[in-house]
């Protein structure tokens, strides 16, 4: 295993663990307080890195048209995604959330094909159909078992849509600019839009009662799940290519399920287990003999 492979495996484990980390933090502070804090920390780190290095030259080269796209990315892929993600995870189980988010690569591929970025083989369409069938079973099973609400699962499905738009719309910019710059700027814009909606949560946060563990989780979710993981992922895309890098996204739901079973006592059984198997089979089918295009970035999973 190379150093890059190790970083990618660690990234997948971090993203998978982050679901349970968020669940634990939400017991200590309101959801928008937590999300506002982690976005603010991660955006500050990204911007400091950009302007402390030669990447600031990329910012200077951004045209008005490109800035418009960056604003769109911040609005849809950061602000809307984060609003839906934190609210959805509050209402559904870690298992449901992680498995639904695992459908993101299939959704991105369909959108990419629709705009002419690539052609999809039959196996990809079959895999997509299996994934969405699996998601429907997970949503139904979670509601019946009382471990999640349809509203929370639907919010997670909406997250998949937001990340799909974010990925496909941002792809042309990656031909001219560093992924770090596009990610950092869009996250900063999304953070600026998100913070006003978190004011009420900040005001009612019992700051004196928050335990050290919660603060450790905030730092984990900021520096590791956002800053480190994004950097490591795009390092993999640059050195290994999108297709090989994207294989590691399959580790995310597995890590999420295992951590949730240990840390939160969640269980996967019945119709939800069938749904999880269908999603896994669908994801594998969408990867079958897939060839990456030179600018392909669509395989990157949703930030958690």
Image: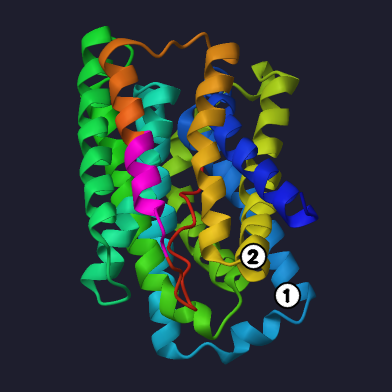
Image location (x, y in percent) of residue 196 = 44, 49
Q: Position of residue 304 (x, y in %)?
A: 51, 42
Residue 8 vs residue 183, the one in the foreground: 8
| Residue located beneath label 1 in the image | 51
Would you place residue 202 above or below residue 260 in this image?
below
Of callouts 2 and 1, which one flags the residue occurring earlier in the amino acid sequence?
Answer: 1
Residue 70, given in percent of the width and then of the height, sits at 44, 73
Q: Which residue is drawn at the image coordinates 23% and 28% (left, top)?
A: 151
Mark 2 is surrounded, within 10 Å at the Cα level, by few (under 14), some (14 to 19) or many (20 or more) other residues, namely some
- Visible residue check, residue 40: yes
Q: Is residue 80 visible?
A: no
Magenta highlight range: 280-290
Q: Is residue 67 magenta?
A: no
The kind of secondary structure element at disc 2 is: helix
Query: What residue sits right under mark 2 in the picture?
Result: 240
- Does the magenta stretch mainly form a helix, a strand or a loop? helix
Q: Helix, strand or loop at disc 1?
A: helix
Q: Residue at x 59, y 12 (%)?
A: 262
Question: Seen in the image, is 207 located left or right of residue 67?
Answer: right
């Amino acid at each position: 295993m190379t150093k890059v492979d190790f970083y990618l495996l660690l990234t997948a484990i971090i993203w998978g663990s982050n679901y349970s980390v968020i669940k634990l933090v939400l017991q200590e502070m309101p959801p928008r307080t937590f999300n506002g804090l982690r976005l603010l920390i991660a955006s500050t780190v990204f911007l400091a890195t950009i302007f402390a290095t030669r990447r600031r030259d990329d910012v200077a080269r951004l045209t008005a048209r490109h800035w418009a796209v960056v604003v769109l990315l911040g609005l849809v892929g950061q602000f809307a995604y984060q609003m839906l993600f934190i609210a959805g995870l509050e209402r559904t189980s870690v298992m449901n959330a992680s498995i639904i988010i695992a459908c993101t690569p299939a959704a991105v591929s369909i959108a990419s094909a629709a705009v002419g970025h690539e052609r999809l083989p039959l196996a990809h369409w079959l895999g997509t159909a299996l994934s969405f069938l699996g998601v429907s079973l997970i949503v139904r099973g979670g509601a019946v078992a009382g471990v999640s609400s349809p509203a929370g699962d639907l919010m997670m499905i909406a997250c998949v849509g937001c990340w799909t738009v974010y990925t496909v719309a941002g792809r042309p910019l990656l031909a001219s600019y560093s992924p770090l710059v596009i990610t950092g700027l869009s996250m900063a814009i999304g953070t600026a839009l998100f913070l006003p909606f978190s004011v009420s949560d900040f005001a009612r946060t019992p700051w004196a009662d928050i335990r050290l563990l919660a603060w450790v989780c905030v730092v984990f979710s900021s520096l590791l799940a956002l800053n480190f993981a994004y950097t490591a992922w795009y390092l993999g895309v640059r050195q290994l290519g999108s297709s090989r890098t994207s294989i590691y996204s399959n580790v995310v739901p597995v890590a999420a399920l295992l951590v949730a079973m240990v840390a939160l006592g969640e269980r996967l059984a019945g119709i939800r287990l069938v749904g999880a198997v269908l999603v896994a089979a669908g994801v594998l089918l969408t990867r079958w003999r897939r060839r990456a295009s030179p600018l392909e970035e669509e395989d990157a999973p949703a930030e958690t």
